Amino acid sequence: MVEAAKRHGRDVVLGDLNDYEPPEAVTATTCFRAIYYARDRAAFFRRVAGYTERKLVLDLNPRQYRLEDVRADLVAAGFDRIAQRPFFSPQRVSLPAPAAAAMRALERSGPLARLLLAFRFSYLCAAFRGGRNT
């Protein structure tokens, strides 16, 4: 993936998420399909908070980690607001428009969405610090 991104002119660095820190602060950090590789999730969030000025966005499998525990780790790391929503769209393929619309409607279905999360899918989470949720 790194080589493909570089071929497309992207500035990409290959590193271990347990150790990597960018050379300077960033406004936002994204971490998809990866927090499960952190040796110590709370320490990982503290390190990310050290170089992230505003927002951390990540996905969370609620069958692997309790949402309440991850929220507590994020608050302890210094993120003062956390928002989450069900995320049912596949990350590897594009769905036809009608199927994508149906998935978005399911994400907003409340109790049905929470039931589906018990068996499949993930949450999309955003942890904010300072200012408005942007």
Image (cartoon, helix red, strand yellow):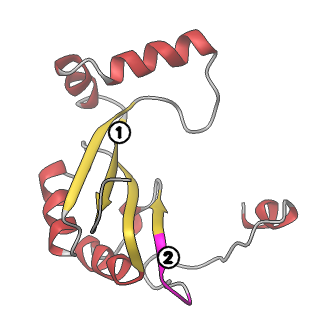
> In the rendered view, would you say 8 is above or below 12?
above
> In the rendered view, would you say 40 is above or below 104?
below
- x and y, in percent, of residue 65 in the image: 22, 52
Q: Which residue is mark 2?
A: 26
Question: Which one is nearer the viewer's eye here, 130 or 88?
Answer: 130
- x and y, in percent, of residue 58 in the image: 39, 55
- x and y, in percent, of residue 49 in the image: 33, 77
* Residue drawn at x 49%, y 29% as measured from the top left: 89
The magenta segment is 23-27
* Residue drawn at x 23%, y 74% as measured from the top left: 42
Q: Main secondary structure of the magenta part?
A: loop
Of the 4 image quadrants, the one containing the N terminus is bottom right
Question: In screen coordinates, is 121 left or right of 29?
Answer: left
* Residue drawn at x 25%, y 48% as measured from the top left: 83
Q: Which residue is mark 1?
A: 122
> Which class describes the residues within 10 Å of circle 2: few (<14), some (14-19), or many (20+)?
some
In this view, the residue farthest toward the front is 131
> In the rendered view, would you say 127 is above or below 59?
below
- x and y, in percent, of residue 121 in the image: 37, 33
Question: In screen coordinates, is 7 left or right of 15?
Answer: right
Dividing the picture into quadrants, the one containing residue 71 is bottom left
Q: Amino acid at mark 2?
A: Val
Q: Amino acid at mark 1?
A: Ser
In this view, the residue farthest toward the right is 7
In this view, the residue farthest toward the bottom is 23
Q: Reply yes or no: does residue 96 show up in magenta.
A: no
